[in-house]
Image (spheres, rainbow, N blue to C red):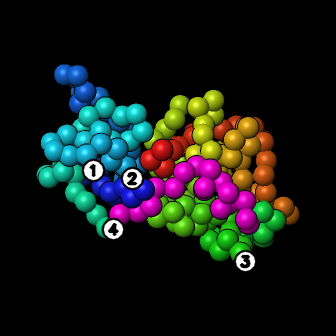
Amino acid sequence: MQRKKWIATLFTGLVFMAANHFTARADMAANTVIPIVAPPPFEQQIGPGAGLGAGPGKDFSQTGPDFPAGTGDQVVSFAKQFLGNPYVYGGTSLTSGADCSGFVLSVYKQFGINLPRTSEAQGEAGIDVGGIENARPGDIVSYIGHTGIYIGQNQLIHASGPKDGIKISSVDFMPVVSVRRVLGN
């Protein structure tokens, strides 16, 4: 299935949505891609389970080609191919070495999703799901100075460090700061 790629241009860092005669505000990181989950004409349902928002035109602009809508399970399956590969500070190579944010960035890049480079910025990308109890496979789990991909059953895959490289760990090996969803499903 193909999904259109849209970027909100209302205000930097803010997306306004209206549903049932009230206005809600959602904080979004700059350049966050919001998947369109309902067809035009004048209003769009944006994000997973979101309310109605402004449609294409002055508030939204289409950018780039369509990108394939991967599922969380597809992201996890792809990421697991690189278990045991090396950790390299500043690296983004899934085969010859990546750091934590480089690993997450490079995995999602294979699904047409461009993420920020740093773990801090990745912790603000997409939609906040409200904690690890709401996490789905493929969500980004962020810590202070670290990030990884949730694989289910309270585990994540991440570029751990020089000793272990890319591995699977329990999500509670450090206090979780945020869980973010960047997939449209």
Q: Residue at x 37, y 49 (%)?
A: 35
- Between circles 4 and 2, the one closer to the viewer is 4
Q: Can residue 172 be spotted in the picture?
A: yes
Which segment is the magenta one? Answer: 66-82
Rendering coords of residue 71 (x, y %): 54, 51
Q: Considering depth in this image, is 80 or 162 the residue closer to the camera?
A: 80
Q: What residue did someone put label 3 on?
A: 96
Furthest-right residue in view? 163
Q: CA distance from mark 4 to mark 2?
A: 16 Å
Q: What residue did someone put label 4 on?
A: 65
Question: Looking at numbered disc 4 in the image, what kind of residue is underneath it?
Answer: Pro
Q: CA distance from mark 1 to mark 3?
A: 36 Å
In terms of sequence position, does the residue under pointer 1 or pointer 3 come before the other?
A: 1
Q: Can residue 141 be spotted in the picture?
A: no
Q: Secondary structure at mark 3?
A: loop
In terms of sequence position, does the residue under pointer 2 or pointer 1 come before the other?
A: 1
- Between circles 1 and 4, the one closer to the viewer is 4
Question: Looking at numbered disc 3 in the image, what kind of residue is underneath it?
Answer: Ser
In terms of sequence position, does the residue under pointer 4 or pointer 3 come before the other?
A: 4
Report whether 123 appears left or right of 76. Answer: left
Q: Secondary structure at mark 4?
A: loop
